[in-house]
Amino acid sequence: MYWAARSDPRLAFRNCGLYGQRTDEIAMRLESCVDGADVLVVQGGINDIAQRRSVTTAAANLRAMVRRGKELGLKVALADVLPWNNGWPDAESPIRELNELIVDLAREEGVALLPFHDTLEDPDRPGRMRDEWTHADGDHPSVAGYRRLGEVAFRLP
């Protein structure tokens, strides 16, 4: 979240994301990643969907990470799942279902929700990111997309 740190000098980020990992795999690395942190941003679920795993299981894994972060005394924020251009249209329904579960989870756990999906969704092409906010791979945000997430959607909990 380079762009969020540029707009708020209090922020320094350590990205522990690994390409292709599901929420269960992310959860196994959580404690090694949060050492020395004040805030935990939990983001995951798209790889669960890509690997045709249950969205309810993904949501349960996200809840466990949120709770563990709180147990460790961290402030916690939860990001919803981005639109996935290469997965559209098949992945749109599971993404929306998981995002509804994430909204509920954030409310129930009293943590900040980072609206990444709606920040990058193209209103003219629901379920997909705008071309200028998507990397050429069609899976990840572009530099402009990450900038938008950092400047528009990221807020400290």
Image: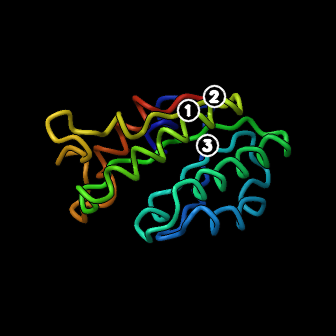
Q: Residue furthest left?
A: 124
Q: Amino acid at mark 3?
A: Ala
Tell me the distance, in whole angstroms, between the alpha carbons under discs 3 and 2.
26 Å
Instruction: Please state the horizontal and vertical placement of residue 77, each as a whole percent of the image.
Output: 62, 37
Q: Earlier in the sequence, mark 3 or mark 1?
A: 3
Q: Amino acid at mark 2?
A: Arg
Residue drawn at 25 percent across, 62 percent down: 86
- Crowding around mark 2 (Cα neighbors within 10 Å: few <14, some 14 to 19, many 20+) is few
Tell me the distance, in whole angstroms, between the alpha carbons under discs 3 and 1.
19 Å
Q: Secondary structure at mark 1?
A: strand
Above-or-below relation of 56 to 100: below
Splitting the image into 4 quarters, where does residue 148 fall?
top left
Instruction: Please state the horizontal and vertical placement of residue 104, each as a whole percent of the image.
Output: 58, 33
Residue drawn at 48 percent across, 38 percent down: 100
Residue drawn at 55 percent across, 61 percent down: 17
Q: Earlier in the sequence, mark 3 or mark 2?
A: 3
Instruction: Please state the horizontal and vertical placement of residue 78, each as a whole percent of the image.
Output: 59, 40
- Crowding around mark 3 (Cα neighbors within 10 Å: few <14, some 14 to 19, many 20+) is few
Q: Which residue is mark 3?
A: 12
Q: Earlier in the sequence, mark 2 or mark 1?
A: 2
Above-or-below relation of 113 to 29: above
Residue drawn at 63 percent across, 28 percent down: 107
Tell me the distance, in whole angstroms, between the alpha carbons under discs 2 and 1.
8 Å
Q: Nearer the viewer, mark 2 or mark 1?
A: 2
State if disc 1 and disc 2 touch (CB < 8 Å).
Answer: yes
- Residue 113's tag is 1
Foreground residue among 49 and 148 = 49
